[in-house]
Amino acid sequence: MKKTIGILGGMGPLATADLYRKIVALTDAACDNDHIRVYIDSNAAIPDRTAAILSGGQDPVPEMASALKHLEACGADCVIMPCNTAHYFLPRLQAMTRIPFLSMLEATADACAARFPGKSAAVLATKGTLATGLYEQALAARHAACLIPDAWEQDALMRVIYQGVKAGADPETYRADMEQVLDRMTQRGADYFILGCTELPLAAQLLDVRQPTVDPTAELAKAAIRFCGYPVKNGQ
């Protein structure tokens, strides 16, 4: 029996829409009826995850748990979150439900090890995600090397994410920040880039980034498709 997906979304709304779009685009389906049933709770009231991790901001888990209860009531067979930073709180959420969460970070680390063996990844992410070390741990478990943005690069990425994509700004307003981060980290030895905030694949698409990348949103979509017993398009 085929399974269903629950998206615990709203972190942010565009990233939630991007994840759903990628689930549809990556499912090998010949007609409407070949697609997966997906439940989405895009709860934009969830407090900022980076602020909670770094500066004592409001705990996002109660609002995340509210969305989780809605997905449980719908009958979701798995839960996925289109927010890398939110995975810091995943153990607390998993303890609240029997429905399995699929980890964006684990799916991404698997893809890195398979696609770029022996290469070094640059982890592009929010300051909150980088502070947790979760990507470094997931990559190290697969013997994949990585570089972390320096202080200036982290500030630039935060501008791209918050003042850029989340704010709906013209991509040209954040092009310089994104391109300087890519150039600087390439010079330091990065072979490819993990777009480790769900706003960054959107930025990369809008800016037509040409460097090799791994898109955690797409990797999570593929993991959820496989979990539900459906084929991934072109065996990706």
Image (cartoon, rainbow, N blue to C red):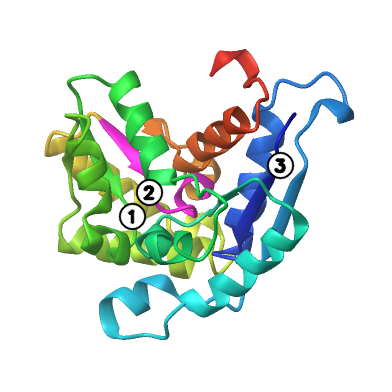
**Corner quadrant of residue 71:** bottom right
Residue at the image point whose x is 38% and y is 60% from the top: 91
Q: Amino acid at mark 2?
A: Gly
Residue at the image point whose x is 68% and y is 24% from the top: 230
**Is residue 230 left or right of 33 when viewed as pictured?**
left
Disc 2 element: loop
**Is residue 47 left or right of 30 when viewed as pictured?**
left
**Corner quadrant of residue 89:** bottom left
- Whether tag 2 and tag 1 are in contact, CB under 8 A, the answer is yes
- The residue that mark 2 highlights is 196
Q: Amino acid at mark 3?
A: Thr
Start-end of magenta stretch: 192-202
Earlier in the chain: of badge 2 and badge 1, it is 1
Q: Nearer the viewer, residue 169 or 214?
A: 214
Residue 18: in sight, yes or no? yes
Q: Amino acid at mark 1?
A: Ala
Which labelled disc corresponds to residue 4? Answer: 3
Residue 85: in sight, yes or no? no
Marks 2 and 3, how far apart at CA: 25 Å
In this view, the residue farthest toward the front is: 98
**Corner quadrant of residue 21:** top right
In this view, the residue farthest toward the left is: 188
Foreground: disc 3 or disc 1 = 3
**Is residue 112 left or right of 218 when viewed as pictured?**
left
- The residue that mark 1 highlights is 125
Dot 1 crowding, Cα within 10 Å, few <14, some 14–19, many 20+: many
| Residue 41 painted magenta | no
- Placement of 64 over or under 221, stated as above or below: below
The image position of residue 79, as x and y in percent, is 58, 51
